[in-house]
Amino acid sequence: MNDVPLLTIVIPIKNEEETIPALAGEVDAAMRGVDYAWEALWVDDGSNDRSLALLQALPSPHRWISFDRNHGQSAGFAAGFRHARGTWVGTIDGDGQNDPADLPRQLAHAQKTGVDMVNGFRASRRDSIVRKISSKVGNGMRTWLTGRTVRDVGCSTRVVKRAAVADLPFFHGNHRFIPTLVEMRGFRMDEIAVNHRPRAGGRSKYGVLNRLWSGLMDCFGVRWLRKRNRQWRVVGEKVGEKQA
């Protein structure tokens, strides 16, 4: 099998010592039957528990990078995209709620249909009613303000071509708009249902009200960006002649 990975799985974490061992095992199990090279790239977002030590003990093809301090989930995904070696990038959260087994299925769907990104939507969410309502409101606001209809833009289970995300415009909170930002750049996306599970351990690092408010503010920023977004395509070129 080629040592250059076809798929890099990016997993941002912060203080997830309770979930890392089990999640790493699930990633290994999910990828065991594939016929292509892959890697998992964990991004430690300034953890102050045993998370980094656990990542350092993981065998290949698990890799890790570590921030100097906490920079947030958006920075975690952005750093993962830029350090990924795969042609394709898969993403899941580090809390164990996303199922790694969905990633090979999403990649197969992308290769079959020819799309550049396959985003998951959580058909049966395993969250509290408050979190479900806040997510539904936030998703509706994002759709209204950004003009892009994505069924579950907050779902982190996705597979996307690295070329589509390696140089996405970065801002705090942009992880909430990855499907929108990818489509704005002219890439094609599809959506399929994915599994969603209760949190495996620990507690959420993101408050409901904080997520809802900051997400709303980010919507206006993305709306501004979308109105000023321009895509071009070069259809001809004159190549200069070589000097004698």
Image (cartoon, helix red, strand yellow):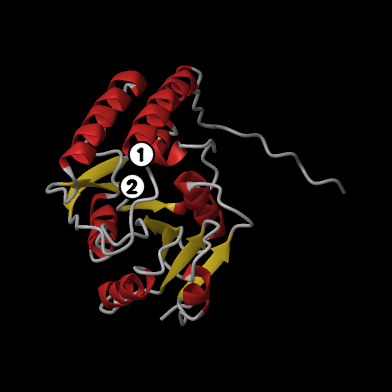
Q: For mark 2, what is the residue? A: 117
Residue 131 in the image: state x and y as whole percent.
23, 40
Q: Few, some or many C-alpha atoms within 10 Å of disc 1 (few <14, some 14-19, many ≥20)?
A: many
Report the quarter where the N terminus lies: bottom left
Eyeballing the image, is 219 above or below 8?
A: above
Residue 183 makes an appearance in the image: no
Which amino acid does the dot numbered 2 rest on? Met
Q: Quadrant of residue 19?
A: bottom left
Q: Looking at the rendered structure, which numbered label has been put on residue 79?
A: none
Query: What residue lies at 37% left-to-right and 60% top-to-bottom?
Result: 94
Q: Quadrant of residue 138?
A: top left
Eyeballing the image, is 112 above or below 28?
A: above
**Is residue 229 toward the left or the right of residue 212 in the image?**
right
Query: What residue lies at 34% left-to-right and 57% top-to-bottom?
Result: 92
Q: Nearer the viewer, mark 2 or mark 1?
A: 1
The extreme left residue here reads 124
Mark 2 and mark 1: Cα distance apart in space: 8 Å
Residue 126 in the image: state x and y as whole percent.
16, 51
Residue 68 makes an appearance in the image: yes
Q: Which of 98 and 147 lies nearest the eye of the viewer?
A: 98
Q: Few, some or many C-alpha atoms within 10 Å of disc 2 (few <14, some 14-19, many ≥20)?
A: many
Eyeballing the image, is 170 above or below 12?
A: above
Which amino acid does the dot numbered 1 rest on? Pro
Q: Looking at the rendered structure, which numbered label has been put on residue 179?
A: 1
Tags 2 and 1 touching, CB below 8 Å? yes
**Is residue 26 toward the left or the right of residue 123 in the image?**
right
**Is residue 62 toward the left or the right of residue 24 in the image?**
right
